[in-house]
Each structure stands twice: as C-alpha cells, then as structure tokens.
Image: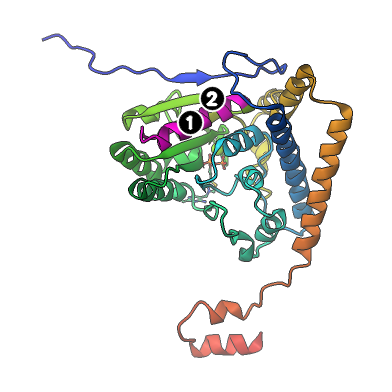
Amino acid sequence: MPEKVIGSFNVKRLDILDAQGNADAALMPGLADEDLRKIYELLVLSRTFDQRALSLQREGRLGTYPSFLGQEASQIGSAYAAEKGDWFFTTFRETGVYIAKGFPLHSILQYWAGDERGMLIPDGMNLFPLSIPVGTQIAHAAGAALAMKYRKDGAAALAYFGDGGSSRGDFHEGLNMAGVLKLPVVFLCQNNQWAISVPRERQTASETIAQKAVAYGFEGIQVDGNDIFAVFKATRDALQKAREGKGPTLIECFTYRIADHTTSDDASRYRAKAELEQWKERDPISRMRAFLEKKGIWSGAFQQEVEARAKAAVDEAQKRAESVTPPDPRDMFTYTYASLTQRQKRELKDL
Ligand SMILES: Cc1ncc(C[n+]2csc(CCOP(=O)(O)OP(=O)(O)O)c2C)c(N)n1
Ligand SMILES: [Mg+2]
C-alpha cells in the first residue's frame, strides 16, 4: 500500500507595522488615538524604568537585574490586549507586563534589591508572582485556566515564557493539558533568540516555536515581536477565542534580547556584534513613534511630556524603594522553622 499524507499544517506569521512605521490598514486592530498614545507612553516608561534599574544595579543598589530592552512591544502589546479578569503568569523578564498592569514601580525595584516583599501583589491585580524557575508558570497558567473553565469566570490566563522555556517539560505538559481540555489559556513565547548563551538553533530543531502547538491540537502563530500592533492583535484575538471556550493558542513573538541575559552576564563573549547591531535597527519604540508621527499624533512636545512623566514616576519609585525599612534578618528564623536547633538559637541571638 502506498504511503499517504495523513497530516499537514500551516503556521501563520503576522506582521502589521514595518520598520519605517507604515501599518497595513487592513490588518490594524482598531485602536483609538487615546489608546495609541497610552501604549506609546507605556513603552517610554518601560524603557526609562529598565535603564534606571540597570544603572542602579551598576551602582550596587540592586542585586541583579534582567533587562527587557528590545522586548517592550511583545510585553506591552500583549498585556494591553488583555481584559480586566484575565490572569498573568510571567517569568523574571516581564517587567513590561508588570508596568502595563500598573504594578507599583517601587515594588519592582525593591524585589530586585533582594527584598521579597516587593513581590507582594496588590489586591485586585491579577498577576501571579514572577517565576524564576524556568517554565513552571506554564503549568500554573494551565491549572488556573482549568479553574476558570469550571467556574465559568469568562476570563483567560496568559502564560509568558522564553524560547528556552519551550524546552522544559512544563511547556509540553501545560500545552498538552490545555489542548486536551480546551482550556482558556494563551501561551506567549518571547523568542528572543537566546537562552543565556544558548542560541535558538541549539534549543530546538523546529523551524518555529509556533508550530509546536500543532502537536497539541491547537493553533500556533508567529508574530513580529517588535511590531506592537501584530502582538496586540494576535493576543487580543487569542484571548477572545479562549474566553469563548474555543481553546488555547500559542503565540511566538519573534524578537531579540538586546541586553545581556542579566547584569551577571556578558553576552559579547558568545554572540556576534553584527547580529546585535542588526536587531538594534528594529527597535520597537522608534517604530511606533514613526507610526504616530505619520498619523499626526506625535510631536516633540508630546515626547517631552511623556519622557518627563516617565522620569518623575521612576524617580519617585526609586525614592520609595530606597526608603523602605529593610527586612529584619531575624524573620529568617522566626518564619522558616517550627523549632530552632541549638545552633540556630545561637545564630539568632548573635544577630
Ligand atoms: C528550572 C531552571 N533551570 C535553569 C535556570 C537558569 N536559567 C535562568 S534563565 C535561563 C534561560 C532562559 O531562557 P529563555 O527561556 O529563552 O528566557 P530569556 O532569558 O531569554 O528571557 C536559565 C537556563 C532556571 N532559572 N530555572
Ligand atoms: Mg530567550
């Protein structure tokens, strides 16, 4: 008997905004001018915050810090597309998502200065504390989506992870469960081409990460992760589909980690300068600025205004973070052990 093809698939790729700031009108998500300005302001705030955090780390005022430079459109575009009841499950690099959700900026600085109280999520803010272990949040998101489905919450979960995270067992288990149970969850991979020093081609033999969804029985789509409109549209549509009970989607935001992995890394030791320079030209923020300018809703005065507001917000956050009373080191003993050993008792006494 001859062999037959019993399966074939397509992986879509969405691009809306080109490098010169021209948008494909037919694909543009309907965003009011007010939303466009708000999104742009969030991008500027994100970069201002990121640069300040890097400087503070260099001055020894933060422990370590994972910059998200270059990934602002993937983070702000997707977070802005969610609705109030949706829940976010992020990794350590999604500071832009926290900023878009209105998480207090001083708390983010406090957290990266080593004070875990910075990760206390304010009531009513649907964020899970960020995940340092790579990939675990993917399973949490699928589990939360199962609860949402049972409770008929009309909400969806959004799980963020990187290209490296897609090699973890949690990724495969989370996607499999979500596919089988048609859970209201969107898996959003920021493929920034690197997992510390491991390049994408050493991460997976697949041509795209998006196509991995096919194996789990649902749609995967790749978008230009530096194109805020493509990210926004794909996320908004996937969340809507999830809320309507039509199951999960995997979105691969094709982007680039411009900075080092964290402040403890030196990427110049393992990646080519030419690659970095090429990606710097695809900056997501200047691309959106060019779009706004062409549309006639950007001016030098507007730029100055948003930069001044961003600087004031970050100054204030730094002041607040640095005026917090440090945690009492004795808490380590008080809240960790049911009873103390003789040695721990001595250590506690000496504090
Ligand atoms: C379970 C686990 N293994 C290893 C690490 C160390 N680690 C931290 S980040 C990282 C790479 C993550 O790469 P990717 O998922 O692409 O995210 P990116 O850092 O590029 O945002 C690794 C291996 C970890 N945090 N958790
Ligand atoms: Mg990565």
Return the x and y of residue 115 as percentages of the image width and height. Answer: 65, 65
Q: Does the magenta stretch mainly form a helix, a strand or a loop? A: helix
Q: Is residue 296 above or below residue 317?
A: above
Q: Is residue 344 magenta?
A: no
- Residue 51 position, x and y percent, is 76, 44
Q: Amino acid at mark 2?
A: Val
The verdict on label 1 being within 8 Å of ligand 2 is no
256 vs 204, nearest the viewer: 256
> Relative to 7, is 59 on the left or the right?
right
Rendered image quadrant of residue 113: bottom right
Question: Along the line of sight, which residue is nearer the eye, 241 or 212?
Answer: 241
Q: Residues within 10 Å of mark 2 (few under 14, many from 20)?
A: many
270 sits left or right of 139 in the view: right
Q: Quadrant of the C terminus?
A: bottom right
Q: Is residue 226 visible?
A: no
Looking at the picture, tell me which residue is in the foreground, 343 or 29: 29
Tag 2 residue: 223
x and y percentages locating residue 294 in the rendered image: 77, 17
Circles 1 and 2 in contact, beta carbons < 8 Å: yes
Q: Which amino acid does the dot numbered 1 rest on?
A: Ile
107 lies above or below 219? below
Answer yes or no: is residue 243 visible.
Answer: yes
Element at badge 1? strand
Instruction: In the displayed orientation, state which residue is furthest to the top.
Output: 2
Q: CA distance from mark 1 to mark 2?
A: 7 Å
Q: Residue at x 38, y 30 (%)?
A: 213
Q: Position of residue 165 (x, y in %)?
A: 47, 41
The span shown in magenta is: 229-249
Q: Give the labeled residue for mark 1.
A: 251
